């Protein structure tokens, strides 16, 4: 058993407050930047180093805006309607992965259009660092004691004192590990000769499936047996399956699983 009594604020100097939540997202941005710079050095992305920096900046804007909008609209609309000023306080947590994914896609689309590069090729390259960053983001949820799991008596259960003192599944850790596994699998599959978009849609499929399974132990309201996050993930899985089998049959057959 672990007692999570972590102070979400690392350092406070007057009005300046440095929180673990913000630091984790900065770390995520650095990881994403390093991966994309590696791709740029290997010639996999038709952008200069400066343009890669610009790309990461706009992707982070899209990620944050999209993640917050989905959290407000789909997950806690009642709370934010009663407390509209809380919408801008992203440092307190409350970021939706599904919204972050949509935000990344929108930002990536407009950047690719501006630079006249293939959007789906760019989406494939962002997929792997993106899911790794998403996993790191779950660690921020752990330090903030949000999105906790259901009660558990397993040896590694966690007591979130700011919640209710009940020992619970460390859902945030499960979700982080699940996303890093997805990122590792995609890294093994990724090759330059894949049809653009294949890796991205595999990400949508694997993450959707993983979220449906891992969220079984997440403490939240259910609708017809599934949470809002699980229902959105079901939509992800259906969309990915349809797109993959219509547009990527050759690539699917190239995987060991389909030989």
Image (cartoon, rainbow, N blue to C red):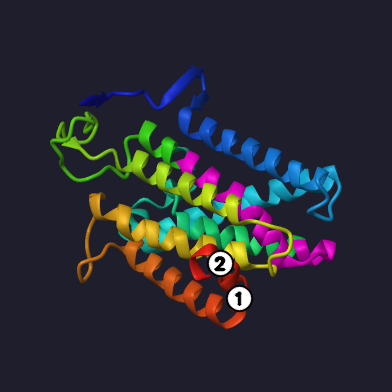
- Is residue 43 shown left or right of residue 136? right
Residue 213 image point, x, y percent: 31, 57
Secondary structure beneath dot 1 equals: loop
The residue where tag 1 is placed is: 248
State the extent of the magenta-drawn residues as a range.
Answer: 112-137
Image point (41%, 58%), residue name: 72
Res 227 quadrant in image: bottom left
Marks 1 and 2, the one that precedes in the sequence: 2
Residue 23 image point, x, y percent: 54, 30
Image point (39%, 65%), residue name: 233
- Is residue 136 shown left or right of residue 146? right
In the image, which disc is placed on residue 201? Answer: 2
Q: Residues within 10 Å of mark 2 (few under 14, many from 20)?
A: many
Helix, strand or loop: magenta stretch:
helix
Secondary structure beneath dot 2 equals: helix
Indicate yes or no whether the magenta region holds residue 48. Answer: no
Quarter of the image with the N terminus is: top left
């Amino acid at each position: 058993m672990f007692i999570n009594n972590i102070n979400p604020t690392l350092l406070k100097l007057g009005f300046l407050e440095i929180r673990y939540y913000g630091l984790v997202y900065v770390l995520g941005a650095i990881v994403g930047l390093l991966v994309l710079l590696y791709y740029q050095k290997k010639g996999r992305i038709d952008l200069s180093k400066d343009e890669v920096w610009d790309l990461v900046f706009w992707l982070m804007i899209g990620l944050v805006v999209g993640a917050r909008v989905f959290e407000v609209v789909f997950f806690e609309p009642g709370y934010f309607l009663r407390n509209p000023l809380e919408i801008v306080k992203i440092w307190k947590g409350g970021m939706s992965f599904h919204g972050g994914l949509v935000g990344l896609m929108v930002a990536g689309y407009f950047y690719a259009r501006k630079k006249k590069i293939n959007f789906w090729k760019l989406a494939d390259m962002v997929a792997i660092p993106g899911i790794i960053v998403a996993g790191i983001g779950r660690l921020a949820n752990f330090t903030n004691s949000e999105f906790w799991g259901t009660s558990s008596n397993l040896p590694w259960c966690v007591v979130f004192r700011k919640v209710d003192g009940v020992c619970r599944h460390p859902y945030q850790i499960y979700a982080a590990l699940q996303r890093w596994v997805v990122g590792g699998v995609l890294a093994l599959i990724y090759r330059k000769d894949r049809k653009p978009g294949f890796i991205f849609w595999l990400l949508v499929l694997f993450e959707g499936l993983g979220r449906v399974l891992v969220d079984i132990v997440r403490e939240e309201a259910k609708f017809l047996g599934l949470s809002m996050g699980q229902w959105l993930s079901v939509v992800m899985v259906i969309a990915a399956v349809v797109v993959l089998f219509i547009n990527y049959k050759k690539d699917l057959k190239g995987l060991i699983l389909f030989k």
